[in-house]
Amino acid sequence: MKNNKIWYLGCLIGILSLLVVFLLDLNKTLEIILTQVFAISFTVSYVKIIHNKMLKEDLDYRISINDERNEKIRDKVNATMSAILMVLMGIIAIISMSIKAYLPAIFLGISVFISPLIMIFISRYYESRY
């Protein structure tokens, strides 16, 4: 709860990127990128701000979020989703190779092979921490 103010910076970055899209005459690629920056930074920041406010003010919400059963369910969902996402990334890499889009295929392939290593290091970190 110490770094709540950083999320307001994310909203500001999102709004500024949208203003740049509307005010400047940019090429199409830059407009798409800045619109995505707006969508991602603004929504993530806004959800995090609301979440932090509700944790601070709403006792039922805080209990519900910090409930042990809910934490175990979230852990199971995250573990299952990481395996599903790795399979999807592998499928997308194969499809990218078949349509001769080699750069995305290489990035996705590397991600598929590196993800388990990253998960092992993160798991060891949290096991030693808790």
Image (tube, rainbow, N blue to C red):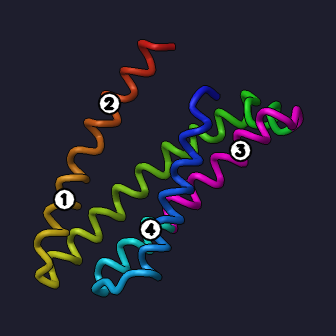
Which numbered disc, 3 or 1, marks the residue that appears first in the sequence?
Answer: 3
Residue drawn at (76%, 41%) of the image: 53
Query: Mark on residue 51?
Result: 3
Query: Mark on residue 17?
Result: 4
Residue 57 is situated, as x and y percent measured from the top left of the image, at: 85, 35
Residue 20 is situated, as x and y percent measured from the top left of the image, at: 42, 74
Residue drawn at (29%, 44%) of the image: 115
Which numbered disc, 3 or 4, marks the residue that appears first in the sequence?
Answer: 4
Q: Secondary structure at mark 3?
A: helix
- Between 18 and 124, the residue placed more toward the observer is 18
Which numbered disc, 2 or 3, marks the residue that appears first in the sequence?
Answer: 3
Residue 49 part of the magenta segment: yes
Label 1 or label 4, whichever lies nearer to me, is 4
Rendered image quadrant of residue 64: top right
Q: Which region shows up in magenta?
A: 39-60
Q: Residues within 10 Å of mark 4 (few under 14, many from 20)?
A: many
Q: In the image, 29: left or right of 77?
A: left
How many badges with numbers are in the image? Answer: 4
Quickly name the residue at label 1: 109
What's the CA distance linking mark 4 and mark 2? 36 Å
Label 2 or label 3, whichever lies nearer to me, is 3
Quickly name the residue at label 2: 120
Residue type beneath disc 2:
Ile
